[in-house]
Structures are given as structure tokens and as C-alpha cells.
Amino acid sequence: MRRKQDAWFVQKDPLIFWLSIAATLVGLFAVLDATTSTSLASGGSWISSEFKRQLAWVFVCAVAYIWISTKDVKFVRRWSIPFFYVLLVACILVLIPGIGITRNGASRWLGYGSLQFQPAELIKIALVGFVAVALTSKHMQKSGRIRDWIDFAEMRLIPAMKRWGPVVAVLFLLLLVELEPDLGTAFILAAIAFGALTLARVPFRGLIAILLVCAALGVLFTMSREYRVERFAKHADRWEQGTVDGTSFQSAQAELAMAYGGSTGVGIAQGRAKHVLPEAHTDFVFVTIAEEFGLLGSLLVVLLLGGLSLRLLSNAMATNDDFVRIVLGSVGWWIGVQTVLNLLMAGGALPAIGIPLPFMSYGGTSLLTLAIAIGACQAVMRGSRVREDAHEAHRDRRRHGRARLSRA
Amino acid sequence: MAHASRKRLTRTDWHGRAAIALVVLGFALVSWNQLKKQWLQRESILSAAAEVHRLVVSQVLPAKRGSIVSSDGRVLASTGTAYRFGVKPGKVPESPAFYAALARATGIPASEIMDRVTSSTGVTEWVVDLSESQVREFQQAKADYGADGVWLTLAKEREYPFRDVLAGLLGSYKDGKARFGLDKGLDSVLAGESGKVVGMIDRSGNFLPWLIDERDSKPAVNGQDVVLTIDSDIQRAAYQALKRSFVSNKAANGIAIVMDPKTGDLLAVATLPSFEPDRVDRELALALSGKRTSPEINPAVGLVFEPGSTFKVLTVALSMDNGVIKPGEKVYCSGQKSFSGIEMGCTGSHGRKAHGAVTKETCIEASCNVAAATWAVRLGYDKFKSFLDRSRILEKPNLFLSPSPKGMFRTNEVNKVIQMANIGFGQSINLSPVMLASAFASIANGGVSMKPRVVKSIGEKEQPPEIQARLFKPATAREMLKMMQAVIQGPRGTATSLAIPGYRLAGKTGTAQKPDPQTGVMQSGRYVSSFVGYVPADNPRAVVLVILDDPRGGQYYGAAVAGPVFKDIAAYLLKRWHIPPAHKPTKNATATSR
């Protein structure tokens, strides 16, 4: 078989690999930059404990990535469903007092001691696989006359359950995550599911219907917490004396950091925002990059993550395998949506609802999820003929073009 | 299957294109947002932040007000250490460690603080006395926990440990403003200069060192400490002695000045009525209704008095210097004498007293108005006027106190004979007590008067003693001191009750009639009782001037009203300075100091 020729560490698409590595390194640096001063102020070393922990996670991620990227599409297909259901159970466990770990009023973590992870974060990649499998499974709808209830079950009920089961599971997941509460993650999960449906070529009118449902859910979730409504309502007035230190504090300070950084930045470690913003190394890690390295630094982040997202999407377009298409496309879509939303919030254009920046925000689970995602993308490309197909298609088009030209 | 997917590939992939288009649109939006905020709208965002003071913050660094210290090293006025510690529930972290830190810093039990925070919704304040390190500890805890809901403010801005004993001199500093007294007069050196930090702060409000604007920031310059010539123990003794007489004689104002004649240093300036520094507003209100002298006025420099008979010391000494009194001359005193048609008597209202043949010694010892007036008239206006100019005793006293009015002497008097006759025994001239004391002090300093000095040094800078004027010949001064001993120890002395057995003291009594401030006519029953004394009589170390204005307790003679104050102060000084007795106390005299 051809895939035997690949050495285990040879990447199917090196560009994706290197963009991910670059983004991770930029993130490591930004986490260190944003936490050094706090660490020094509290009597620690300039190498902050957050940085050390993140670095440790990078090694865990490397192992996970290497392991999964040597697998193939069959492996991904086989394990997607169980992986999803295990994590769905974990998402339920998180909500049970005494099992889930609560911090700052949110129960998001499972684990013990310093070994903790967020199931809702990890389920993002499981969701991609789950939806991809669900959308590419063939549901045989037997036609024929229904004579008894067994016929009805076989011909109507079971296919219906197979078709609608995943939808129910996804909606249930969204509800669970929102109950943590974690609106940001719920939103990203919904976006992933929606992206997967789009890539599975669900008719546009169906997509619009789903979009409306999602929008309704989004409004409902937002309205359910007063502070969220207030953040949206007051966003335009974020520089008013009454809101600048309260509701709009994060947005105003983030926006200020952008302006303060200017086009070339204030210089490495010279930033101000990281001393002011409470989440400088997590959701607002971009602020430090933008402030210290200016517009150039911001555009570098856009280039890295935008490039990665679009590369995955274009790879998805080039494949003829629907499962691979959905996995690659959904991961690309997910990274794109999450990056865009985080950057708009960190840039002060949207009120903050807690969405981390892929690869860069502090947080081990988020990084591990992405490592598995990128690894899985490499794996699914291994089992199918993604690049080859693309080349064939390319050649095809060129040949047709030439033929047309010669004919003309 | 393969056929189907090939069919799909050839079809336009609208779904994929839409996803890619959305992502591209998203990243375009992000890029546009960054371009706008980091470049195009940069200035307007920065100015919006500046408008609400969220970018560059400026903070005033208050200067520490200088202390006022006595010559014996006691703090007389200083910035306080009592703080008001306040808590506002809802804006403090609910961490037990935070309350423990607060308890450590303030000495208030953590449970009490926590109680107030959880049980009430309003602000709670405690008054606590804190050391500088405790204040630092508090600020550290506040910064560590980012607690906006706790604060410390100075409870009392200025502390005056000697309270009413020195209030008249030190004055008052309240509500960030020097109100009066030395605290106001020396405000420019005590206040210092507040500084400013301009820069950017972190979330707990601390300035980020590398984001401080060095051009606009400047450190606070603390106020300088001022050392006074006042000796706190002598001051307390003088104040207590004065207060006894002031209360029992129901006087309107009381002044006791203790001056070092060699330097002009004021060792004590006790004045009454006094006040508690923290209740000054009540006293101001009383003063407005006319019930007392305003605390803004220090009577030792802020009021002028006709000195009365004590002034004879100057008249006689001046007459001696000018050869007006012939050696061994005797003036006959029948109890009264007519000057230019106006009858002037010896101690007019309190029983005419004929002194008979009066020498200059008797004139001082028995306080003869007739003789003093005779010699003053003989001295003449011009010589006296030139003495006043030379001596500078009509000038404003320069003790950093206001008001400090000049002395008053009429130069436009038509009948200069009557004027000089009156001046002979200390009427028709108004002097501020401090300037009068400096003139008297010249007798104890070989005829040279020193400028009254109350500020010894400002910061590191010494304010050296200055000569005010040479008033009398040294021989005259020596002789005059001897003559004044007779007032206390002579057979006809007016103040023999003030003698302290074993010690030689000198002095002169004074009982001036008070003219009506409107008409200038002498009022019956209103007097200014005074006494000037020297401790000890040989080579005096202190000149003591005691004035009790308008005693209404029945007694008004200088010897009876002001004299005892002198005696108490003298007794204290003798003990304080371990001055040995000049001779053994006579057997029949009891050794009392009161």
C-alpha cells in the first residue's frame, strides 16, 4: 500500500504543521510576556508558573499529535463516536457538584490536583468527528408497505432516530455547556456543527432554518445572564465614565491597548494592558501581542491563524471523500471562527464573552484539542487521496482549458 | 459512489465556497478592525481614554508638613498619626486572608471588620493610631487584594501635644489650611511643595515604573522643621502661673513673656484666653460675639497697651543717660503736681500718696509719678522721640505672627508738656508687649536690646540673634538693675510681697488706667496690671514681663495681679536653672516659692 512509504513523522501537509508550530511558539511567548510581571510582583521568577505549565502542555500535545497523526482515516472514523459520547458524559459530570471543579463561578473542569482539563474544550474535535461520521453514514430507508410495528420501526423509526439522534445529541451538548456556564464555548460548538452541516452540502434553506434556531438559542442564552445583555447594550458607550471601569472595562482597555500599541508597538515587555486586564494571558493574550508589536504583530497573528484555517478549508475542497472533507473543513472553519471572534473581542470591536485564541491563549485543554485536531487532519489526509485528487483535478482543468484554447 | 463524487466535483461547490468566503470575510474584518484601531483611529481612541483619565493618570504626592519643635526638643506641632480606617461593603474581596492582613495592619480584629462588611451596607469607619510601617502594611494589603473599598485618611491633620499651653503661639492648621499663629506665619517653610506623578497605572493603581512621564512628574518636597526658642517647660510653668492669676482676677487678656536678655530669645510666650486646638471654631464664634479676644490674635504681639509705671524704668534710665537727673537730685512729691495746667498725681484713683523728697531710686522703688513726669518733661519731646526711633520699640514685632500692630505714639500732640508728663509714667504711649519686653531686656544686657526671636532655626538654617538697638549706657543699665531690686526688697518697695527668700530679684510694677477706645478718656475701674522682673537680679538670665488686661476680680495693682505670676515663674526659673541663692534666707522669712 502506498501509505506504507510515508515515514511516521512525515507530515501529509507540512504547511499546516509549520503554521501550527509557529502559532504555538508565538502563543508560548505571549503567555510568558503577559505573566512575567505578575510573577515577579508576587515574588516569583520571571519564568512564570503559567508559562511552565503551558510548556509542559506543549510536550503533552506533541506526544498526542505525533501519535494521532500517524493514524489514518479509518482510525478517526472508528473512534469519533465513542470519543464524543465519553466526552458528552464528562460534560454531564462537570455539572455535578463535587465532581466538577468550580472556578470564578463556572464549573468547567474535571480532574485532580494540577491535572485538570475542560471536557467542553476537548469535545470540539470530538464533535467534528461525530458530525462527520453522522453525516456520511448511509441510512438505508427501506421502501415498502408497512404491515406491522416491526416494519414501522425498521422503515421509519430507526432511520429517523439515526438521522435525528446526532441533532439531539448536539443540542443537548450545547445546553450542557451553557449550563456550566460557558457561552463562548457553546457558541463555538454550535458554529462547528453548523460549519460541518454546510460542508456536508445540506441545502441552503435547511441551513437557514438551522441558523435561525441557533440565533434564537444564542439570544436566549445571552438574555439568561444579565451581565451579558449589559455588555452588549453598553458596548457602544464603552468610553463613558460610568461604564469604562465596569461593564465595558475589558473592551475599553483592550481597544486602548490597540491604539496605544499603534503601528509598530511599544516594544517587547513594555506593554501596559497586561498590567490592567485580568485575563491578559488567556482570552486577551492577543492584546499584549498587538500592544507590544503593533499592527505588524496583529497582522502576523492574522496571517498565521487565517492561513491555517484557509489551508484546511482549501484542502477540504480538494478532496472527493465527504468524511475527509467534513473533518478538514470543520477544523478549518472552527479555527477560523474562533480566531476571528477572539480577535474582534480582544480588539475591542465586540463585547467579550470568553473565547480563547487558538494555539495562543493559556490553557492546556485548548492546546491539546487543537493538537488532536491537526493530528487528525494529517491522519485523514493520509488515508484518502486528498493531494493527489487535487492535483488531478488541477491537471484536469488545465487540460480542458488548453483544449479550449487550441480549439479556439 | 466514485461516480457520484466525481459528478459532485465537477459541479460548483457552493457550500465550500460559502464557508471559505465567510472565513475570509471574518479575517478581513479582523484586519480592518486592527488597521482602524492601531492606525486610522488611533488618536481618537487615545483622546477618548485621556478624557476619562484611563490612560495617563496624574496623582498628587502630598508633602509632609514640617514639625514645630521646642528648643528643648519637644514636638509642639506635627502631622498626625491618627488615621480614619474605612470600609465600604461590596467593594472588598471576601477572602479571610485579606481580613487577616487588614487586622495585622490596623490592630482591629479581623472578625470585627468582617462583621461590619457582611452585616451592613453603609460605610464603617474606625479611628486608629498607626505607625508608618503599619500604614505601609495597609497599603500593601490594599494593593495585593485590589480592594477599592478600604481606605485610610488622616483623622487629625495636625497634632498639638501642648494643646492650650501653646495654642496662642502655634495657632491652628485645619482642613488643609494654616489658619493662624506660627503655623500660618511659617506656612511657606512648613508646607513644603507637593509633588506629582504622571504616568500609567496597573490594575491596583500602582504606577508602572517605566511608564512614568519623567518630564511632568516631580517628587514631593517635604516641609522643613522649625525649632523655636520656646522652652516647653518654662512655657508650661509660665502658662500655668498666668492662668491662675487670669482666672482669679477675671482678666480679659493675660500675657507672660520670658525673654533671654542676651539673645532676645523668647523662652516662653504664654497668652490667655487660649483654646483647645481642635475646638478652635467654637472659640472663633465666641470671639465674633465679643465674648473673648479672637484666637487669631496673640495678645503678646497682636494687642498694644499703655505700659504704665513699668515704663518709668525707661524714663529714668533715659533721663540718667541724658544728664537730666542731677546727681543726688530730689524732686518733692506732694502727691500731685500741675503740668501745663493739668494736675497729675501719684497713683491718682487709689488714694493720693505723697512721696516727699524723691530721688531716682525712690522714684523706681516707690513708683512716684510726679518725679517721673518731672524728669520726662525736662528730657523733652525731641530727645524722647529720637529714643523711640533709635530703640525701634514702636515697630511691628517680627515673630511670624499676624496681626502684629505697630506701637502708637502721637507726634501731632499740641501740648507736648502734658504728653511728656504722661509718658513719664507710661501713659499716652501704646506698645506691644513683646517690644516692651525687648526694651526692658536691654537693662539686663548692658543697655543693648536684642530683637525678640521666636524661631531659632528653619530646617538646617539657624536664625541668628540680632541686636535691635543700644538704648542705654552700660553703667546706667547696671545702676537701674540695682534700683529695681529695691522694688522687691527695699523698705518702700511696691512689690515686697514677691520676694523669694535667699534670692536677689529685680522688677517694677505697673498699673495703667485703660482709656476708652472710642473717646480716649480714662475709664475708672479699668486697668492694665503689669510687672516686669529680672531673674536673678545680678546678671539676669531672664526678663519676665507679665500683663493682665482689665482684671475685674477686685484687685488691680500690678504687684497684686501680675506680680504673683512673676514670682511663680521666677521661682520656677531659679529651680530649673539651679541658680544658687545669693545669701542665706533671713530667719523670719519662710522659704516658700509661691
Image (tube, coloured by chain):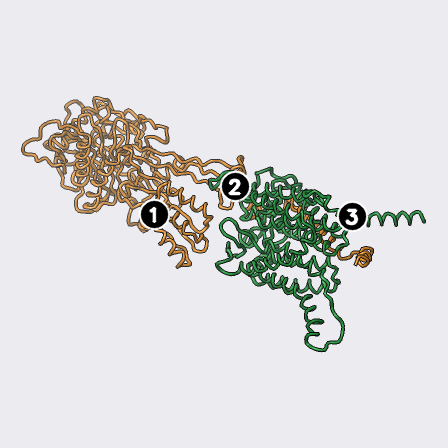
Chain colours: A green, B orange
* Residue to which mark 2 is pinned: A48
Q: Nearer the viewer, residue A164 or B492?
A: A164
* Residue to which mark 1 is pinned: B107
Q: Please name the amino acid that badge 1 sits on.
A: Gly
In this rendering, which labeled residue sits more in front, label 1 or label 2? 2
Q: Is residue B371 left or right of residue A326?
A: left
Residue B330 seen in render: yes
Q: Please name the amino acid that badge 2 sits on.
A: Ser
In the image, what residue occupies the spot 64% across and 54% down? A125
Q: Is residue A160 above or below residue A310?
A: below
Q: Please name the amino acid that badge 3 sits on.
A: Glu
Residue B445 picture quarter: top left
In this rendering, which labeled residue sits more in front, label 3 or label 1? 3
Label 3 sits on a secondary structure element that is helix
Q: Is residue A71 left or right of residue A394?
A: left
- Residue A136, given in percent of the width and then of the height, sits at 72, 60
- Residue B153, given in percent of the width and then of the height, sits at 40, 47
Residue B532 picture quarter: top left
- Residue A243, given in percent of the width and then of the height, sits at 55, 54
Q: Nearer the viewer, residue A247 or A78?
A: A78
* Residue to which mark 3 is pinned: A388
* Mark 3 crowd level (few <14, some 14–19, many ≥20, 10 Å Cα): few
Q: Are marks 3 and 1 on the same chain?
A: no
Q: CA distance from mark 3 to mark 2?
A: 46 Å
Residue B343 seen in render: no
Q: Are marks 1 and 2 on the same chain?
A: no
Q: Is residue A78 left or right of residue B202?
A: right
